Image: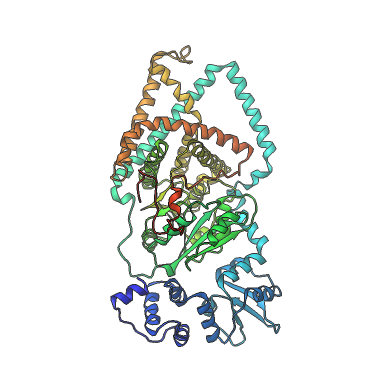
Amino acid sequence: MGISELRQAAIGTDQSDNAFDALGGELVRQGVIGPQDAALAGVVRKHCDATLDRVLMAEGLVNQDDLLEAHARRLNSRRLSRKELETLASHAPTQTDPRDLIKDGVLPVVDRDGTEAVATGHPYVVEAKGGITPDQRILLADPLEVQDEIAARHRGHLTELAQARVPIIESCRSWGSQRQQRLAVSLVLLLLIGALTWGFPQVVLGFFVAWAAFTLIVSAVLKTAAFTARMAAGDAALPDAPPTSKAPLPKVSILVPLFRETEIAHHLIARLSRLTYPKCLLDVVLVLEEEDETTRETLATIDLPPWMRAVIVPDGQPRTKPRAMNYALDFCEGDIVGIFDAEDAPDPDQITAVARRFQELPDDVVCLQGVLDYYNARQNWLARCFTIEYATWFRVILPGMEKLGFAIPLGGTTLYFRRRVLEKLGGWDAHNVTEDADLGFRLARHGYRTEMIGTVTGEEANCRVWPWVKQRSRWLKGYMTTYLVHMRRPFLLYRQLGAWKFWGFQAHFITALSQFLLAPVLWTFWLVLFGLPHPLDPVLPRYVLVAFGTLFLTIEAINIAIHIVAVSGSRHRHLIPWVPTMHFYVPLGSIAAYKALYELIAKPFFWEKTTHGLSLNAASLRSSDHAVDLAGIKFKTGHEGF
C-alpha cells in the first residue's frame, strides 16, 4: 500500500522520531512535502525494506533534485554537477573493486582542496555502514551520474568480468580457439558416416532406427512419468502466492535485456507499469547494448518512472543476452533478481507472489520459474502449435519433472533468483546461447533447487516459419552446447548431481536432441503403415517393421493425449482441435536441429536474434493525436487479450 492509498484510508500516523527524520524534516521545512506525507512515508517504510527517499520518489512526491538538495543541507555538504563529478573522480585512486562501488553507489573523489571524499546519490548507504564521522566528507551527485562514472572509469574490468564470470570448467568460452579442430573432426566423422552408408546402407539405417526407437521410448517414459506426477500433484504442482505475510517485502531487481526493440519499447514500459509490487522496492534495469543506438534513442523519448533505469553494456564479444545480463547484474540493487524479455506481459501481481513464496521456502530453493504462455495464440497455425507446445512444457512436463526430483532446464524469462547465489555461481555463461537451460543444471550441480510457481507471463509466439526455425536452432544449439559442457567431466557431474538427477539429465538432453535429428528416420515407417516397401525389408521381417510402426503410432497417441490435457483449461480450450496437427509441426524442429548442428561447428557463439513485435498492430503504437498510447496493448482482429 502506498501513500495515496493510506491517505484515502485515513490511516493514522505516529510522527515520532526515526532514523530518517532528518531528511523528512528537511523536506518538510523546505515545503517540498507536507508533515502528513512525511509521516505516511514512515508508515510505508515499516512494511517495505526501503529508504525514505525511495518511498517519496516512487510516490512522485519528490524528484531527484529535491532529495539531493535536502541531503546536502542536512549533511552540510554540496551537490556536484556531472562535469565536476568527472573532474574530481579523475584524481581519485581506482584500487577499489568496481562491483562494490556500484553496489553501494559511491565513487571515491578528491575534492577541490585535495581532501579525499566520496560522491554519492545515496548517503544513507554510508550512514548505514557506520555513520558519518567528522573527518569523512560526502559530496552529493545524481545516482545515475555516479553509476555512469563508475562504469566509465572501470569499463575494461567490468567488460572482462561480464565475459568470463563463470568458471572455465563450467563454460564453453574455450571453444573459441578450437574452430579448426572442430571443423577437422566434423569432416572426418562426416566422411566416415558417408563411407559406412555407401558400403553398408542397411546396417547404418538399422543402427539409426534402433537408436531412434530407443530414445523415443525413453522420451515417452520420461514424459509419461512427468505427466503422471503432475496430475497426481494437482494444484500443488504450480503453487500460487502464499497467504499474505507480515514480513517486510524485499527489494526486487528485474533485468530486461533489449536489442533492437524499437517496435515494442513503449508497450514494454506500459506492461511493466502494471506491476502491483510496491514501486519503492522495484528496480527495473533496462539492459541496452552500446552499439544499439536506435533502441537507446527510442527510450530517450520516454519519461521513465524513477524505479526504472537503463544500463548501457559496453560493446564486446560475444554479443549475447547472457553477457549483457552478467554486466547488468552488478548494477542491480535487489535481493531477488528476475528476468523479463522485451515482449513479456507478466501477471500484475507476479513479483509479489514470487517475493512471498521465497520468504516461505528453504534457502536451498534459489530459483522460481514461472509459467510462460502466448498471447497471440489465434494468429495463425504456427502460433497455435507453439502455444500447445509451451502449455505442455510449462504446465505439465516441467512441473512433473520437478515433482519427480529431476533438475530442470530453465526458461529464458519469468525467472527469479536469490541474488547472493546467482553471484556466487558467476551469473550466466556469456558464450552459451541457451544460458537459461545451462544455469538450471549449474544450480543443481551446486546443490540448489528450482521450484515452479503458478504465476503466468504472456509472450509473443514466433509466428513466421523462418524466424521460428532460426529461434529454435539457437535453442537446440544451446542444448547441444550445454550437454557437451556438463559432460566434459562426467564422473564429476555424477557426483554432484547424484544418480537420479544425472540419468534424468542424460534422458532429457539425449532424447530431445536425438528425436529432432533422427525424426526423418522415423518418418520412413509411414511406408510400412501404408503397405509400401521399406529399405529394411531385406533384413527385418515385415512383422518387426509393423511392430516398430505401431510403437511409433502409440507414442504419438500418448503425445496427443498429453497435449490435449495441457490445453484443456478455459484459456486454451480452443486449441484442442489443432492438437493432431502437431505431427506436422515437428518437422520444423528437425530443420532447426540440422541448422543448429552446423552452427555448433562453424559459429557456436552466434546469437540468432528473435524478432519481436510481429503480432502487434503497428497502427496501435500511437493514438490518433500521435502521442504514445501507454494505456493498453492492442492486437490485430482475432487476437486474445491478456
> Which quarter shows the N terminus?
bottom left
570 is higher (above) or lower (below) than 69: above
Residue at position x 68%, y 70% in the image: 94
Give the percent coordinates (x, y) of residue 586: 44, 32
Give the percent coordinates (x, y) of residue 106: 59, 73
Closer to the camera in the image, 623 or 360: 623
- In the rendered image, the residue lying farthest to the front is 625
204 is higher (above) or lower (below) than 297: above
Left or right of 162 in this view: 566 = left
- In the rendered image, the residue lying farthest to the top is 538
Closer to the camera in the image, 492 or 223: 223
Is residue 574 something that shows in the picture? yes
Give the percent coordinates (x, y) of residue 65: 53, 77
Rendered image coloring scheme: rainbow
State which quadrant residue 573 falls in.
top left
71 is higher (above) or lower (below) than 488: below
Left or right of 15 in this view: 435 = right
Closer to the camera in the image, 440 or 454: 454
How many numbered badges does the structure rendering display?
0
Is residue 426 something that shows in the picture? no
State which quadrant residue 10 falls in.
bottom left
615 is higher (above) or lower (below) than 204: below
Residue at position x 60%, y 17% in the image: 198
Give the percent coordinates (x, y) of residue 379: 39, 41
